[in-house]
Amino acid sequence: MDIFIQQLINGLVLGSIYALVALGYTMVYGILGLINFAHGDIVMVGALVALAVAQALAASLLPVPLVLLFATLAALLVCVALGVTIERVAYRPLRRAPRLAPLITAIGISILLQYSAALIWGKQYISTPDLIKPEAFTFGGAQFTDLQAFIFLLACTLMAGLLWFIKASRIGRAMRATEQNAEVAGLMGVDTNRIISFTFFLGSAIGAIAGVMVVLYYGLGHYFMGFMLGLKAFTAAVLGGIGNVAGAMLGGLLLGVIESLAAGYIGDLTGGVLGSNYRDIFAFLVLILVLVLRPSGIMGQHTSERA
Amino acid sequence: MLEVRGLKVSYGGINAVKGIDLDVQDGELVTLIGCNGAGKTTTLKALSGLIKPSAGQVRYNGKDITAQPSHRLVRQGLALVPEGRGVFGRLTVDENLAMGAYSRRDRAGIAADRERILGWFPRLAERRAQLAGTLSGGEQQMLAIGRALMSRPALLLLDEPSMGLAPLMVHKIFEAIRAVAAEGVTLLLVEQNAKLALEICHRGYVMESGVIALADSARALLTNPQVRQAYLGE
């Protein structure tokens, strides 16, 4: 039972990060029908920028919260600029091209970002400077840290804010309208190109914060970290129903919990043959199962191919 | 108000509109009638910025608006109710109307217009919180017209508002169109139901395979033997 609660807590924290990254995939898919495979690497860039800024400022006498704030702001700025630029330069010219063209472009951008990061920051693991020392609390025989609580609560606040924004704001409504019928949205006076830019802006900003969370949580950054994170977040988006914002949130949390619980029990279940380092299997097991059993995901509409 | 000169549109290798001239005066109700595939919808799409004409000029209030994107035209008072309605199915009736007012910022005016438009269409008022996709075809057409009116257009282009609707509903839609015109909105109406269209409009153009075959007052067209035979089913 202790393992269960412990892994549930760990899973929710991890899942809230997956959910934030999954939002970037699902929002872009919703509006363009494109899987932006570069999104995981945008998150990676955010993480490494935050790390670099934190390292540069660690020696200064600035208070820790300020260092973290500056690091996060730098990550936000770089990620947003990257996301919007990539859409403008790489995807927009292919708007009317067959679907495969932007998809392959996205993979190309992903590789470009990875090796650019490797050039700038090297291929070794980069560790976070010792800025924070998480304090542990006990709950029902399980432990959690204030850092975990902070990540989870911040992620939930961001998600609630995003849901409200899409539901109630003028731009959020225009995003939904553009997603349903871009041509008619244009007739209403919506500059759909700007809405698409804004979608990349929003996804990249949320991704940047997720990137900062990852380096705070694991204390490590690496030029290839966006690959696995991106694939898992993509899986979370598919699990929730790709294109569905609330679905991405649910899918992220669920995937985090499934992965953590499975990692917690895999040793017992296989008689010690497989250890928790095999945890990555589960995300992809989930992906395969969803694609086979319910390709539209938990909250996805059963729509035919979009017009 | 609207002057079209030598408008040509082609897409996919087909010349759908082969150089037409067309005028709509301020306050007028003008209809464009013709068979399926005559180029009526293509003409409206070109006028409202949805497709780029290959040649010709469109002037609106004296300004050249040829090939301006639709999101700019609606800000200048030119709105289109597209063929097939194009309501946002997963938005509520209220949200659809709010989208119609996207180009406006005057909250009080928008709210007043919404109530006025819902007053015209009581069926919509009863269903304001419902998703537009759950409405009947006729209700969706009312919503599409109401939504376009939310932008306070000076010139409203209507593409086949009676398409696929039951006779009773067609009657209601045309009543609404008449009410809109009475408010001073200038209308350019594309219709396959030529009789209905000519009965409410001042002037009409008859389009045949991409060109204007006839242009006259609606009354004259209604009594024109050629038109009666080809479009009024006599």
Image (tube, rainbow, N blue to C red):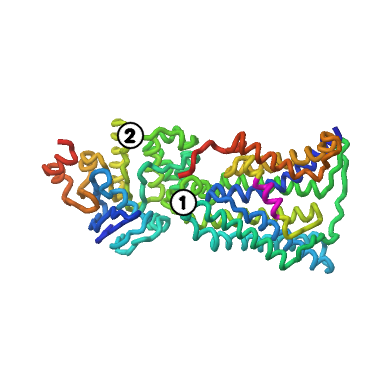
Query: Marks 2 and 1: which is nearer the front?
Result: 2
Magenta: main secondary structure equals: helix
> Is residue B61 in view from this perspective?
no
> Does any portion of residue A225 appear in the rendered image?
yes
* Mark number displayed over residue B190: none
Q: Residues within 10 Å of mark 1 (few under 14, many from 20)?
A: many
Q: Secondary structure at mark 1?
A: loop
Residues in magenta, as a range: A226-234
Location of residue A33 in the rendering, given as x and y in whole percent from the top left corner: 53, 48
Q: Pointers 2 and 1 in contact (CB under 8 A)?
A: no
User: Left or right: B207 with respect to A154?
Assistant: left
Question: Which secondary structure, mark 2?
Answer: loop
Which residue is found at the position 36% from the left and 58% from the top? Answer: B52
User: Where's residue B43, x and y in %?
Assistant: 30, 52
What residue is at 43 percent from the left and 35 percent from the top?
B125
Q: Amino acid at mark 2?
A: Leu
Q: Which residue is mark 1?
A: B102
Label 2 Cα crowd, 10 Å radius (few <14 / some 14-19 / many 20+): some
Quadrant housing residue A280? top right
Q: Quadrant of residue A238?
A: top right
Q: Position of residue A93 (x, y in %)?
A: 49, 60
Per the image, the residue denoted by label 2 is: B165
Q: Quadrant of the C terminus of chain B?
A: top left
Mark 2 or mark 1: which comes first in sequence? 1
Q: Chain of mark 2?
A: B
Which residue type does callout 1 highlight?
Answer: Tyr
* Along the viewing direction, whichever of B123 and A11 lies nearer the viewer: A11
Q: Nearer the viewer, residue B62 or A10?
A: A10
Looking at the rendered image, the quarter that the N terminus of chain B falls into is: bottom left
* Left or right of residue A246: residue B174: left
